[in-house]
Amino acid sequence: QLQLQESGPGLVKPSETLSLTCTVSGVSINTNNFFWGWIRQPPGEGLEWIATIYYTGTTYYNPSLRSRVSISLDTSNNQFSLQLSSVTAADTAVYSCAKMYGSATTNWYDSWGPGILVTVSS
Amino acid sequence: QSVLTQPPSVSAAPGQKVTISCSGTSSNIGNNYVSWYQQFPGTAPKLLIYDNYKRPSGIPDRFSGSKSGTSATLGITGLQTGDEADYYCGTWDTSLGDWSWVFGGGTKVTVL
């Protein structure tokens, strides 16, 4: 049974770097056709995709966040991580990690973690 | 403002049908498969439809998906109070050169 679980601080100060980790259980993140991503949802708003990484290390970033975001894999611990720098109050959101299934022609998100609320405040 | 346009809300009586549109361009929906997600308040989104119209195991056939040109549609028949949720479409977008995933702005379904 695949499970994803986000972890990290729930409170980050403005201008600092937000760092989150997603621990994956039930499947190896080194699996062909599996992508791993981060999605956030500000309170009362819709879903915003942040970044996705393929098991090979290929990365995809939201153009509006690209200059501040980094996504990486930790295969030894079956985890992947997100770093978002220079945060402001606008980055306050529930951050969720998710698994995407992908092939040469199609992709979809099929598993999600429960999400973690990160508040940016001094 | 999302790259994919969805109506903010739709509503219908129990047992009726609703459709949710997701409008895009040739840089996203027009050349990529669309997936749909259901989200109840305070919970993680759940995959409803993938590859434009396919349903994962366990999703009832009351939910259907279709795509035509640069628009996709989610249909819900036999509407139930348990269907009250937010619904999002999603797909890849290449309008800025690189591949980036995009979600629609979301549609709230209300059962009258």
Image (spheres, coloured by chain):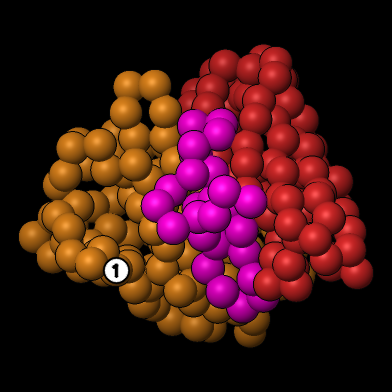
Q: Nearer the viewer, residue A76 or A101?
A: A101
Compared with A51, A12 (above or below) is: below
Please tell me which residue is depicted at 61% across the width and 78% down the height of the picture: B42
Whether residue B92 is visible to the viewer of this picture, yes or no, is: no
Instruction: Specify the segment rendered in magenta.
Output: B37-62
Horizontally, residue B104 falls left or right of residue A82, namely right
Q: Which quadrant of the figure contains the C terminus of chain B?
A: bottom right
Q: Chain of mark 1?
A: A
Measured as percent of width and height from the top left, residue A53 is found at: 33, 43
Q: Where is residue B41 shown, x and y percent of the image?
A: 67, 75
Q: Residue at x 48, y 72 (%)?
A: A115
Image-quadrant location for residue B39 = bottom right
Residue at the disc numbered 1: A3
Q: Which chain is red?
A: B
Q: Position of residue B76 (x, y in %)?
A: 71, 50
| Residue name at image x 73 percent, y 26 percent | B71
Q: Is residue A91 magenta?
A: no
Q: Nearer the viewer, residue A48 or B70?
A: B70
Question: As shown in the figure, which amino acid type bears the numbered disc 1?
Answer: Gln
**Residue B63 drawn at (x, y percent):** 62, 49
Badge 1 crowding class, 10 Å Cα cut-off, few under 14, some 14 to 19, many 20 or more, is: some
Q: Colour of chain A?
A: orange
